[in-house]
Amino acid sequence: MSAAMQACRRLIGHDACIAAAALRHALGSWSDRLTIVLGLPIILLVGSAWARGLDGQREQWLALALGIMAGLTAGRTAAERLHYHRSDGVLAELALVHANAICFALMYFAVGLAMTMLVGMVVAPGALATLLAGNGGGCLAGFALQILGQRRSAGAWRSRRILQTMRRPKIVALIVAVSVAAIAMGSQWLEQRDAVAVAGVAVAAAALLLGPVDSERMRFSAQCGQSTWLALRHEGWRLVVLGLVVTTAALALIGPDAAVVAAGITLAALLIQAMAVMIFRAVSRRMAELVFAVSLGVLATAWLTMLPIAPVMQVVALAWLARKSETARWRLA
């Protein structure tokens, strides 16, 4: 066995031990384990029954979306874990070797592909080739985007300062005002369909600016005993204000279609933000980013490919995370 493969096995084994410990902590009670054991097969069966009613072309699109989302999750996870091993891990000497890093990433891609293919054989058995292609592209894209995003870590203090700036009421008011101005200009200068698209882009851009959460702040709030609801209220008010204002503006200036788009984008941003708040409170610093990336990837895949069961999965995930977030209060570890 080559030295790179041996090093890769040690790195993967280390991650497997961390994941197993995190899973034991997450599923500490028998009710949690019973929910997973009973709920996962039901979700797969419902998704399979729904997918059987799709024609060939829609099944191909379903497989492509499933493959891309799963690949993005696997690629981002591989890059995140590699960054951890190189910067904070006990096996940094192995992870810093280029050949070992490539082998490590490929192993993560292979594990993600195997899990995706198992789900694909249940949900979209007639489009496995499309699933494979989408997964490969998603893995490469997710890995590359995460590597590029990690460059910001060298200026982490600047990122935290930007987050604090975005919390100021005057900055929030300015961003909301710019979004409303974009909606107003689109309603005056563009056709109905194009104006709706402009409204969606404006709201999405504003949500990207107002939605991010400071993980260290959330972790500190849990250690100080702050409740989950209070943390959600402190973080979510910006998106709530954005949603109310832009939805009203879109309804008045463009029409109900634009209002639905604006409200939907804001609601999605609120759900993602709520997940981030609870995960950063409940999960250790070492695993929080990984858990958030995997959870977001799974739920996004469900919303894109298995719409009938996606709301159920979303509600169950939020309820479970809320319980874990509450139990993390006053915990210093």
Image (spheres, rainbow, N blue to C red):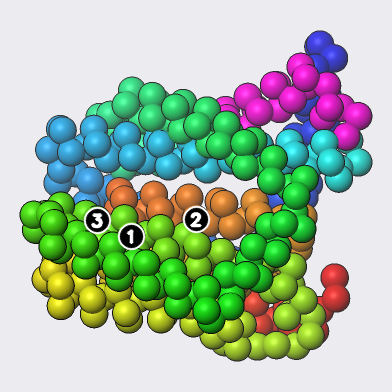
Most extreme residue toward the left is 191
| Residue 308 seen in render | no
| Tag 2 and tag 3, C-beta contact below 8 Å | no
Where does the image place residue 32, in percent across and percent down from the top left?
Answer: 58, 70
Q: What stretch is highlighted in magenta?
A: 92-114
Residue type, numbered disc 1: Ala
Give the vertical position of 218 relative to 151 (above or below): below
Residue type, numbered disc 3: Val
Which of marks 1 and 2 precedes in the sequence? Answer: 1
The quarter in which the N terminus is drawn is top right
- What residue did someone put label 2 on? 296
**Which residue is drawn at the image coordinates 12% and 38% (left, top)?**
55
Give the vertical position of 44 relative to 331 (above or below): above
> Circle 3 — which element?
helix
Residue type, numbered disc 2: Leu
| Disc sitting over residue 66 in the figure | none
| Tag 3 and tag 1, C-beta contact below 8 Å | yes
Marks 2 and 3 sit apart, C-alpha to C-alpha, by 25 Å
Q: In this view, does 11 lie to the left or right of 132?
A: right
